[in-house]
């Protein structure tokens, strides 16, 4: 089984199938978005034509949203998936939110969360989009706790309760708006329907993958993850390999070559973060060069299905300069491949 080649195909890094950000994000189920700026590149590089303006237009018009779902971390999610994904993962996010608050000695009462939600509805109504600092000013004026830790907890709780979501684009700043004013109403899904939809999205876009990969990516319990896979059992192709059971959705592409293929992956990219075990594309001895133990991920160079180094960019006098640090001195990709990858990124940024 050629795992790197199949993942490049199904993650749309090889011969992309989609033209619009909404199509791509919907196909993926969710796209990691901790780094707001580079998350746009993660989407753009997976489209037939990579252009920052397309991504920002989709975010501005509410075709895709940046919101906390699943583990919980920031993700980009298609509009039609926001409500059911929030409902499915809200209990886990609240639990993590409460645990984080207690870790900082914050015992936030439910009544205070209710007051926070009411205030958010009041200040954001009428189609307003505001940054976190702007919202903080209103909380200060209202006499609410408005330090960094309280505001983070208030806003994450408000997301889980369907009060706020990402708002209109304002440069590189994330904004918040009311979910009821931004996300079209969709009929509720049952838990089984939500689990099946999540499993389908994951295994069609991340295959080949194993159960533990799905559990990691989705944040589901072992029981729920197994149930989700069982719900789409007839859609999955299964293969026993290296003492593990691998799943591939029947809609996945299975033919492609990684030869001559190079990408400048953003930090927190799905090709790494979408799996618990990353050793198929990155030898374990180089893990620390790609990510830290506390969850910080770096930009990496993906060459012919393998991560071989780090990359960085610096803008000097409106000129982007790229630098590289390869994991092994003897491994250095062709300069033409690097040049093409750089030009793709520059074209994405500048349109």
Image: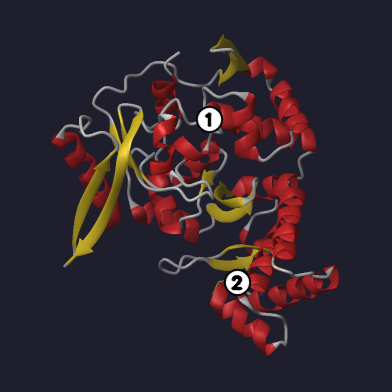
Q: Nearer the viewer, residue 76 or 83?
A: 76
The tag earlier along the polypeptide, 1 or 2, is: 2
Say left or right for 114 vs 336: right
Q: Identify the residue at image location x=58%, y=12%.
A: 243
Per the image, label 2 sits on a secondary structure element best described as: loop
Say left or right for 166 vs 334: right
Which residue position is annotated with label 1?
A: 277
Mark 2 crowdedness (10 Å alpha carbons): few <14, some 14-19, many ≥20: some
Q: How far across and how far down the image is residue 170, in percent?
A: 45, 69
Q: Identify the residue at image location x=39%, y=16%.
A: 255
Mark 1 crowdedness (10 Å alpha carbons): few <14, some 14-19, many ≥20: some
Q: Is residue 158 visible?
A: yes
Give the quadrant of the N terminus. top left
Q: Nearer the viewer, residue 11 or 177?
A: 11
Say left or right for 60 vs 305: right
Q: How far across and how far down the image is residue 187, in percent?
A: 75, 45
In the image, is residue 146 above or below residue 252? below
| Numbered tag placed on residue 127 in the rendering | 2
Distance CA(mark 1)–CA(mark 2) = 42 Å
Q: Identify the residue at image location x=27%, y=29%.
A: 261
Q: Identify the residue at image location x=76%, y=54%.
A: 95
């Amino acid at each position: 089984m050629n795992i790197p080649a199949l993942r490049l195909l199904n993650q749309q890094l090889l011969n992309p199938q989609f033209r619009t950000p909404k199509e791509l994000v919907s196909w993926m189920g969710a796209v990691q978005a901790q780094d707001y700026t580079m998350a746009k590149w993660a989407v753009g590089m997976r489209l037939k034509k990579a252009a920052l303006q397309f991504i920002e237009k989709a975010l501005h018009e509410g075709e895709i949203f940046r919101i906390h779902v699943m583990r919980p971390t920031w993700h980009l999610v298609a509009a039609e998936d926001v409500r059911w994904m929030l409902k499915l993962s809200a209990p886990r996010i609240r639990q993590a939110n409460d645990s984080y608050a207690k870790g900082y000695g914050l015992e936030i009462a439910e009544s205070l969360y209710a007051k926070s939600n009411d205030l958010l509805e009041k200040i954001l109504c009428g189609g307003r989009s505001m940054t976190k600092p702007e919202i903080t000013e209103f909380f200060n004026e209202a006499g609410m706790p408005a330090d960094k830790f309280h505001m983070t907890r208030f806003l994450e709780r408000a997301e889980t309760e369907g009060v706020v979501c990402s708002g209109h684009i304002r440069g590189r700043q994330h904004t918040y708006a009311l979910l009821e004013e931004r996300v079209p109403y969709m009929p509720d899904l049952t838990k089984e329907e939500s689990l099946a939809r999540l499993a389908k999205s994951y295994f069609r876009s991340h295959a080949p993958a194993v159960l533990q990969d799905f559990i990691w990516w989705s944040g589901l319990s072992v029981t729920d993850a197994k149930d989700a896979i069982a719900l789409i059992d007839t859609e999955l192709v299964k293969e026993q390999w290296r003492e593990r059971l691998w799943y591939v959705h029947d809609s996945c592409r299975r033919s492609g070559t990684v030869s001559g293929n190079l990408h400048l992956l953003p930090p927190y990219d799905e090709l790494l973060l979408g799996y618990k075990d990353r050793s198929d594309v990155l030898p374990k001895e180089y893990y620390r060069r790609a990510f830290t133990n506390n969850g910080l991920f770096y930009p990496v160079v993906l060459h012919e299905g393998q991560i071989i180094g780090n990359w960085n960019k610096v803008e000097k006098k409106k000129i982007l300069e790229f630098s590289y640090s390869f994991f092994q001195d003897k491994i250095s990709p062709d300069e033409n491949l690097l040049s093409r990858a750089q030009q793709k990124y520059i074209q994405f940024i500048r349109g």
